[in-house]
Image (cartoon, helix red, strand yellow):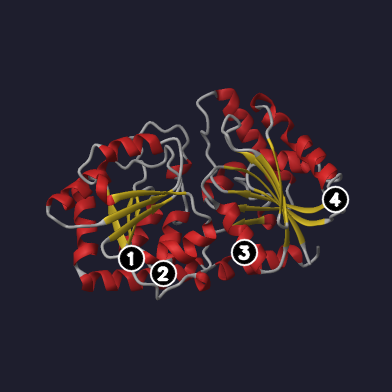
Amino acid sequence: MKNILLVSHYTDTPGVMDKLSLYFLKHNYSLVFALNPLNPKSSLKSVIKIDEREIKYKIFWPFQYIFEGIIFFIKYKFNIKKAIKFDLTVCFDPLSFFHAFLLKRSLKVGKIVYYNVDFSTRRFRNRIANYIYLSLNKFAFRNCNYSFYLTENFIKNIDPNNKYRDKTFLLKHTININSIDKIIKKLPNSIAYAGNLSQTVDFTNLIKALELIKKEGINFTFDIYGEGYQKEHLEDLICKSIIKDNVNFKGIVSNEILLKEMLPKYMIGVCPYITRKNDYVADNMFTGTDLTTKIVEYIGSGLPVVATRLYGAFYVIEKNKFGFLVYSPEEWYMAIKKLLLDKNSYKIYSNNTLNFAKNYDEEKVLTSVFNKILQDS
């Protein structure tokens, strides 16, 4: 059995790491997790997970980024008595890679993968912080055994001359299509949002559209899965709206349960992303190469998508007729109303989502990659 160490910073909302860990478990890999809060000031704790065991601890926030690697190593050695040789370590951000690389020999790590999930050339307003971020990215890319990335913007900036092309893999967001219940009964007139309630989404125009639908006497349910600093603001907006009785905040659900049991029962998935007009520092939201993880999860669950367009790749949504691209409240209104009331159109769009989602099946995207990486481990 192959042993894999997953090293990452994390938030309340499940992400790429959680999905990849489910893939590894399905293929009978043994996993150890080394997780630290993305925001050191949050209430989240650092976590070491191995089998069913969890070791949680809090690092005084000003020191977390500097000492999280060595503190993990001490906690790991003190609490985990058995020696584990890791065939592979996957790091999901450059700082996690930096700490794992420094501990490579001590942890008995074989190959290291740097998996970049949200590269930005302008992550921070502070120039010094941004320089450190970009330098860590270059360090991780040059010193890893293999590099995974989700946007071509990453490789254009980090390796413009393709010097390290042989160790790089451009991946898509994935979904385990076979695990999803495709015959589950749909909730009538149901809409879902599942994701982080962060600065990357703006519900203003969506709420206005739902108010128009409500005024026409069309009943609906809008369930929101996720947490984030914007949740309080969103709750306040909805509390003052006529749709407050139609909206439910469902909190956080594990990625496995969300995909297997929750999302498939809804009719529509919404992605009210921000636009460039929003005051957002990082540019990674607008430089993607393929569909986002939210959209992939929706279509894999059979949900037609209504989304704000982030970049050119989103045009496949309307080209392949599995959803609509919108911006204004009127566009949101027309798209959602059509999917709720036009049953023939809804059936066509729903079937198209499942057909297009086959391009993102995790076996198709990941298995050949990991077979290549692990064959010599």
Tell me residue 347's x, y (percent).
28, 73
Q: Earlier in the sequence, mark 1 or mark 3?
A: 3
Tell me residue 32's x, y (percent).
73, 53
Q: Give the Cα distance between marks 4 and 1.
A: 47 Å
Q: Most extreme residue toward the bottom, as rendered?
A: 183
Q: Secondary structure at mark 4?
A: loop
Q: Which mark is residue 356?
A: 2
Residue drawn at x 38%, y 31% as measured from the top left: 279
Kindly check if marks 4 and 3 are in contact, taking CB atoms under 8 A apart as contact: no
Q: Can you identify the residue that label 3 sits on?
A: 23
Q: Give the Cα distance between marks 2 and 1.
A: 8 Å
Q: Can you identify the residue that label 1 sits on?
A: 322
Locate residue 45: give its quadrant: top right
Residue nearer the viewer, 52 or 159: 52
Q: Give the Cα distance between marks 2 and 4.
A: 41 Å
Residue drawn at x 68%, y 64% as measured from the top left: 370
Q: Give the Cα distance between marks 3 and 2.
A: 20 Å
Q: Earlier in the sequence, mark 3 or mark 2?
A: 3
Residue drawn at x 42%, y 74% as measured from the top left: 182
Kindly check if marks 4 and 1 are in contact, taking CB atoms under 8 A apart as contact: no
Up-down: is 78 above or below 326? above
